[in-house]
Amino acid sequence: MATGALRDIHFEFDRYDIHPDDAKILDENAKWMRANPNSLILIEGRADERGTNEYNLALGERRAKATFNYLAGQGIQANRITLISYSEERPQCTEKNEACWSRNRRAHFLVRPQ
């Protein structure tokens, strides 16, 4: 289930590095995760529609993994987090422009209480 407590982070085109503004979001997400130690987290790596399915699947996975690595570095237990890549599937926006594509390039968080 989605929760307003965990915010998505976004990525530049063809990139999977964590920007400083997104690091602040992940710091807040990690704070919530520490306060809710029984919650299991799913990180969904997403991409925009440009590129092949195979490339976007791998890019979504790298985005999810970069997000996971950052959270693990903040002390979040790895066994609480599951990763999946949806590549360009499940877009947040379907218009054909950069503003829309930038919203789709993200790591999305879902929570499953234990």
Image: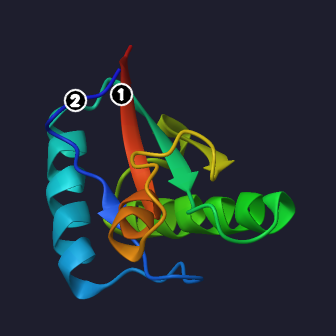
Q: Position of residue 54 (x, y in %)?
A: 85, 61
Disc 2 secondary structure class? loop
Q: Are marks 2 and 1 in contact (CB under 8 Å)?
A: yes
Q: Residue at left 25%, top 73%?
A: 22
Q: Position of residue 48 (x, y in %)?
A: 56, 63
Tell me which corner region of the image, top left, top right, bottom left or bottom right, holds residue 90: top right
- In the image, 95 versus 51, the foreground residue is 95
- In the image, 75 versus 97, the foreground residue is 97
Q: Is residue 96 left or right of residue 62?
A: left
Q: Position of residue 72 (x, y in %)?
A: 43, 61
Q: Is residue 36 left or right of residue 113?
A: left
Q: Which mark is residue 3?
A: 2
- Label 1 belongs to which residue? 111
Mark 1: give few (<14), some (14-19) or many (20+) Cα within 10 Å: some
Q: Nearer the viewer, mark 2 or mark 1?
A: 2
Q: Residue reaching furthest top?
A: 114
| Image vertical order of residue 109 relative to residue 73, above or below | above
